[in-house]
Amino acid sequence: MSYYINLQKSINYIESNLKNNIELEQISKVAGYSLPHFYRVFSAIVGCPVKEYVRKRRLSNAMFDIVTSKKSITEIAFEYGFESHEAFTRSFKLAYGAPPSRFRKAQVEPALYEKINLLSKNNEDGVIILKPEIICKDEILLLGIARKINQSENIKFSLLSKV
């Protein structure tokens, strides 16, 4: 259970410093772990690397500001630690599939990446309670090669990728 408490301290630190320069060494110190151990534990429990979590939270908060405020997109980009408008737009487009200006014009309800609260995910026994949900995605086009394989043949699956 102490892993959850220590990681929650680091998440709280990240949340309170999203608009500041966040040093990963400082985050690991807040949790009380060495940097390599912190990377492993954070990824295992949170489900993504710490840098990705910070980036997602910054972009999520920036998305909220873009939709709800009158600040310029460049101002918001610098506010959340991006070095340029272009770097912010690239990262934003990669995360949300469209540039920030399109979200501002559309005034859509943003789908935010929420702060993780590890302590609320646990019951009294320290077991993570999973809440599965069904998500409908748009169709995708898959491409493959049809090939008949005889079950009696001893084919290594690693060779199939070379076909």
Image: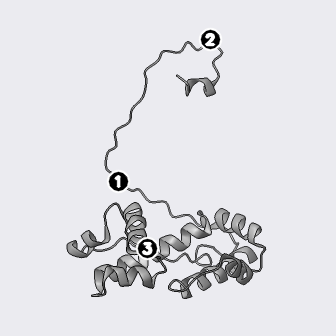
Image: 22 above or below 46: below
Secondary structure beneath dot 2 equals loop
Residue where numbered disc 2 is placed: 152
Q: Is residue 133 visible?
A: yes
Is residue 88 shown left or right of residue 31?
A: left
Residue in front for this viewpoint, 20 or 130: 20
Q: Position of residue 156 (x, y in %)?
A: 65, 22
Q: Quadrant of residue 121?
A: bottom right
Gap in angstroms between the C-alphas marked 3 and 1 = 23 Å
Q: Position of residue 131 (x, y in %)?
A: 51, 64
Gap in angstroms between the C-alphas marked 3 and 2 = 52 Å
Residue where numbered disc 1 is placed: 136
Q: Residue farthest to the left?
A: 105
Q: Residues within 10 Å of mark 3 (few under 14, many from 20)?
A: many
- Marks 3 and 2: which is nearer the front? 3
Q: Position of residue 136 (x, y in %)?
A: 35, 53
Residue where numbered disc 3 is placed: 59
**Image quarter of the N terminus:** bottom right
Q: Which circle's residue, 3 or 2, is located before the other in the chain?
A: 3
What amino acid does circle 3 point to?
Leu
Q: Residues within 10 Å of mark 2 (few under 14, many from 20)?
A: few
Residue at x-position 55% and y-position 88%: 16
What amino acid does circle 2 point to?
Ser
Identify the colour scheme used.
one colour
Q: Quadrant of residue 92?
A: bottom left
Residue at x-position 64% and y-position 79%: 23
Image: 2 above or below 132: below
Secondary structure beneath dot 1 equals loop
Residue at x-position 73% and y-position 74%: 3
What amino acid does circle 1 point to?
Cys
Is residue 24 shown left or right of residue 144?
A: right
Q: Position of residue 59 (x, y in %)?
A: 43, 73
